Amino acid sequence: MNVFAALDVSQDLTAICVVEGAGTVLAEANVRTCPDAISAWLAGQPVEMERVGMETGPLAIWLWNALTERGLPVLCLDARHANVVLKMMPNKTDRLDARGLVQIVRTGWFRAVQIKSHDAYVTRALLTARDTLVSMRVRLENEVRGR
């Protein structure tokens, strides 16, 4: 049985919706926005998830890395593309957004976003810091040379 889930992530709570292959809602919940709480709730479901989708956003990188470490098949959906579908719904709540996202994940009509690993972000931060230091050194050398 194909089972799909979607997360509508906000700062405090995450709305979760789980559907089966035909689109019937199997379960819904609001849990704390914490990888432990989300993975525990999903692990407590009687079936294994084929895909778990969530939109890009401020918490997406953190959650994606944490949930994939816990073995969940998480996809990150392009928020601009998902928003086009979600805008068509007359009422906009976190629960209904999760329902809309899970239907997008179920049908496969989404554009997945590639999330880099935590190590890639650490390396990027080091390279950015190095670039800043080099440009500061060049400005200081030019300042001294100009006097």
Image (tube, rainbow, N blue to C red):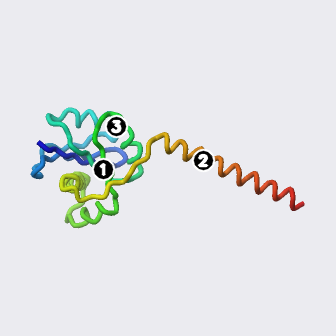
Q: Which x, y percent locates residue 128?
A: 60, 50
How far is the residue under mark 3 from the one under mark 1?
13 Å
Q: Which residue is mark 2?
A: 127
Residue type for callout 1: Met
Q: Residues within 10 Å of mark 1 (few under 14, many from 20)?
A: many
- Name the quarter where the N terminus is drawn: top left
How far is the residue under mark 1 from the one under mark 2?
29 Å
**Who comes first in sequence, dot 3 or dot 2?**
3
Q: Nearer the viewer, mark 3 or mark 2?
A: 2
Secondary structure type for disc 2: helix
Find out whether the residues at labels 1 and 2 contact each other: C-beta distance under 8 Å: no
Residue type for callout 2: Leu
Q: Residues within 10 Å of mark 2 (few under 14, many from 20)?
A: few
**Who comes first in sequence, dot 1 or dot 2?**
1
In the image, which disc is placed on residue 54?
1
Residue drawn at x 30%, y 50% is 54
Q: Nearer the viewer, mark 1 or mark 2?
A: 2
Residue type for callout 3: Pro
Residue drawn at x 21%, y 62% is 91
Secondary structure type for disc 1: strand
Q: Which residue is mark 3?
A: 35
Q: Residues within 10 Å of mark 3 (few under 14, many from 20)?
A: some
Residue drawn at x 55%, y 47% is 124
Quarter-of-image position of residue 46: top left
Secondary structure type for disc 3: helix
Q: Which x, y percent locates residue 12?
A: 35, 44
